[in-house]
Structure formats: structure tokens, C-alpha cells
Image: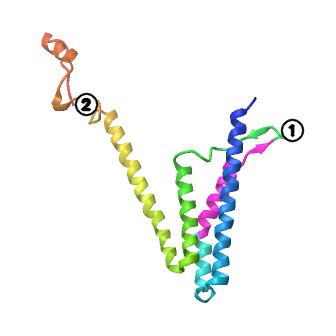
């Protein structure tokens, strides 16, 4: 039972990597198949140039996931390194969003033509929205920590019983910012 968590992590990462590589091959093969055989008359050199250029980020993300998430084993089969968690929140989750959106755009471009590549413009817009919402929640959290508002503040400047008693005795005056 030694390294049970590492073995589970390695198994999950291996399954995720197999899935993203299979989906990547499937979507790109579908694009080539449909563009070369079915919609041959509407395919131009620009179609394939756009496909190559706009697939580079997806390929780079897959390479990165493979580099950080691929488990390594020792000579006797024990897990040396289970790789980083590919189900982690934050940047990894965002990179999966970009990957899935890229595949969706590739599929739509294979069926509907070159105008579907404009859906790729949603990725930078999503990035801006994500950064804004993250910054906004961090800013609200920081305001709560500094006492400038938040859930723990009492309405209309009401004070606690302890503060009222201290002020009534003339002891410590509580200063509010």
C-alpha cells in the first residue's frame, strides 16, 4: 500500500493524457477528412494555414500537459513521480478550457468553413472576463480583511456589548477607521 496516492494520481494523469491525445487526433483527423474529401471545393490554402496556426496553442497545451503530468516509473515498476495533478483548479483548468474550445472551433470549421475560425476570438474575451472576475473577488476579499466592508461588519456602525461597556466606563476608546 506504499504510495497509494501517487499510484492513483499516476493512473488519473495517464487516463487524462490518453483522453486528450485521442480527442486531439480525432478532431484534427475529422477536420482533414471533411475538408479534403467532403468540402473539397470550399477548401483553400488559407483554410489549412488557419488550421495550422490556430491549432498551435492546443498542441502546445497538450505538450505542456504531457510534460508536467506524465508519470515516471522506476526500473522495478514503482512510481517515481506521479506528475502534477491535471485535475487541479486554476491555470490547469483554464488551459483545459482553451483546449476544449480549440477542438470545438476546429470541428465547427471543418463543418461550416473558414468563418467558424472567428469563434477563436472568444478565448481572449474569456481570458479578460476571467481575469476581471478573479481580480474583483480578490479585491473584495482584501477589502474584507482590512475592515473596509465585508460580511462580519455590523450595520449602521453598531458596536458590540463589550465595546459599549468599555466606552461607558471611560476606559479605552475604540477608534473606527
- The local secondary structure at tag 1 comes to loop
Q: Position of residue 151 (x, y in %)?
A: 29, 33
**Which quadrant holds the C terminus?**
top left
**Which quadrant holds the N terminus?**
top right
Q: Is residue 61 above or below residue 116?
A: above
Q: Which residue, as the protein is rendered here, is positioned at the far bottom?
A: 41
Compare marks 2 and 1 and give the one earlier in the sequence: 1
Q: Position of residue 56 (x, y in %)?
A: 61, 67
Q: Is residue 57 magenta?
A: yes
Q: Is residue 163 above or below residue 70?
A: above
Highlighted range, magenta: 55-73
Q: For mark 1, what is the residue?
A: 76
Prevailing secondary structure class for the magenta stretch in the rendered image: helix
Q: Quadrant of residue 49?
A: bottom right
Q: Which residue, as the protein is rendered here, is positioned at the far front?
A: 38
Front residue of 91/12: it is 12
Q: Which residue, as the protein is rendered here, is positioned at the far right?
A: 76
Give the residue displayed 21% in from the left and 20% down from the top: 160
Which mark identifies residue 103?
Answer: none
Q: CA distance from mark 2 to mark 1?
A: 59 Å
Mark 2: few/some/many CA within 10 Å (<14, 14-19, 20+): few
Q: For mark 2, what is the residue?
A: 153
Q: Quadrant of residue 45?
A: bottom right
Q: Quadrant of residue 73?
A: top right
- The local secondary structure at tag 2 comes to loop
Q: Is residue 62 above or below residue 163?
A: below
Give the residue displayed 48% in from the left and 74% down from the top: 118
Q: Is residue 11 above or below residue 48?
A: above
Q: Is residue 158 magenta?
A: no
Give the residue displayed 61% in from the left and 69% down from the top: 55
Give the residue displayed 40% in from the left and 57% down from the top: 129
Amino acid at each position: 500500500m506504499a504510495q497509494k496516492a501517487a499510484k492513483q494520481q499516476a493512473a488519473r494523469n495517464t487516463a487524462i493524457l490518453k483522453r486528450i491525445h485521442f480527442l486531439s487526433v480525432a478532431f484534427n483527423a475529422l477536420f482533414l477528412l471533411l475538408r479534403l474529401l467532403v468540402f473539397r471545393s470550399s477548401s483553400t490554402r488559407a483554410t489549412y494555414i488557419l488550421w495550422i496556426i490556430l491549432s498551435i496553442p492546443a498542441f502546445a497545451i497538450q505538450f505542456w500537459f504531457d510534460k508536467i503530468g506524465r508519470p515516471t516509473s522506476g526500473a522495478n515498476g514503482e512510481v517515481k513521480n506521479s506528475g502534477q495533478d491535471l485535475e487541479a483548479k486554476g491555470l490547469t483548468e483554464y488551459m483545459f478550457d482553451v483546449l476544449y474550445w480549440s477542438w470545438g472551433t476546429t470541428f465547427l470549421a471543418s463543418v461550416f468553413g473558414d468563418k467558424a475560425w472567428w469563434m477563436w476570438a472568444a478565448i481572449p474575451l474569456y481570458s479578460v472576463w476571467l481575469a476581471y472576475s478573479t481580480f474583483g473577488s480578490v479585491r473584495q476579499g482584501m477589502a474584507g480583511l482590512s475592515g473596509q466592508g465585508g460580511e462580519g461588519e455590523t450595520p449602521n456602525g453598531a458596536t458590540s456589548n463589550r465595546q459599549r461597556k468599555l466606552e461607558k466606563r471611560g476606559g479605552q476608546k475604540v477608534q473606527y477607521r
